[in-house]
Image (spheres, rainbow, N blue to C red):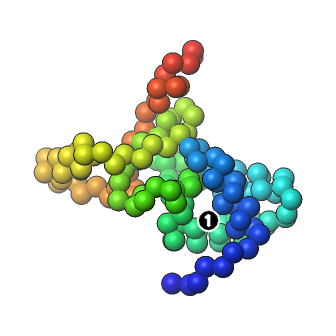
């Protein structure tokens, strides 16, 4: 594995993601946010840093069905994000880390009853969070 070196661009990207820990963000969202800041960062730098941060486990990357974009979320504070499932609010985009025993039971039952071996790192359950359910439509 390549050694990790810190650059101003990487620091700005991480800082932005840390300040938005419960949001799903595309590379474009991140690019637009950091380009409005104190330094100029090109798109290639954004993508390269996002890929590297995913490799070292600081970011979680996922893709929603029927969407072209990858989404990123800061995850360094959540150990082993690749070992548990996630749920996402379909309205606000907030991502929840599902590492409770019922998730292990769900995983085991899917395998036993349907023969489906779930990859937790690629599994996102969509629904509406309690905050969005309380909002008026």
* Residue 61 seen in the figure: no
Residue at x 63% of width, y 46% of height: 20
Q: For residue 41, what is the image quadrant?
A: bottom right
On screen, residue 82 versus residue 38, left or right, reads: left
Residue at x 30% of width, y 45% of height: 100
Q: Residue furthest left?
A: 112
Mark 1 neighbour class, 10 Å CA radius: few under 14, some 14 to 19, many 20 or more: many
On screen, residue 76 versus residue 15, left or right, reads: left
Residue at x 61% of width, y 79% of height: 4
Where is residue 44 shown, x and y percent of the image? 72, 70
Total numbered circles: 1
- In the image, residue 121 sits, relative to residue 114, either above or below, namely below
User: Which one is nearer the viewer's eye here, 123 or 84?
Assistant: 84
Secondary structure state at the residue bearing disc 1: helix
User: Which one is nearer the viewer's eye here, 21 or 44?
Assistant: 21
Where is residue 90 shown, x and y percent of the image? 50, 35
Where is residue 135 shown, x and y percent of the image? 56, 19
* Residue 137 seen in the figure: yes
Q: Which residue is mark 1?
A: 50
Q: Residue furthest front?
A: 77
Quick one: quadrant of the C terminus? top right
On screen, residue 45 versus residue 106, left or right, reads: right
Residue at x 46% of width, y 47% of height: 65
User: Which one is nearer the viewer's eye here, 101 or 51?
Assistant: 101
Where is residue 37 shown, x and y percent of the image? 84, 55
């Amino acid at each position: 594995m390549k050694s990790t070196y810190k650059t101003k661009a990487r620091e700005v990207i991480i800082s932005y993601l840390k300040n938005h820990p419960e949001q799903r963000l595309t590379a474009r969202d991140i690019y637009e946010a950091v380009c409005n800041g104190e330094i100029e960062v090109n798109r290639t730098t954004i993508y390269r840093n996002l890929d590297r941060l995913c490799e070292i486990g600081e970011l979680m990357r996922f893709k929603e069905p029927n969407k072209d974009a990858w989404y990123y979320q800061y995850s360094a504070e959540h150990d082993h994000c690749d070992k548990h499932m996630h749920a996402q609010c379909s309205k606000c985009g907030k991502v929840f880390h599902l590492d409770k025993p019922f998730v292990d039971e769900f995983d085991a039952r899917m395998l036993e009853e349907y023969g489906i071996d779930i990859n937790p790192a690629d599994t996102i359950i969509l629904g509406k969070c309690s905050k969005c359910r309380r909002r008026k439509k």
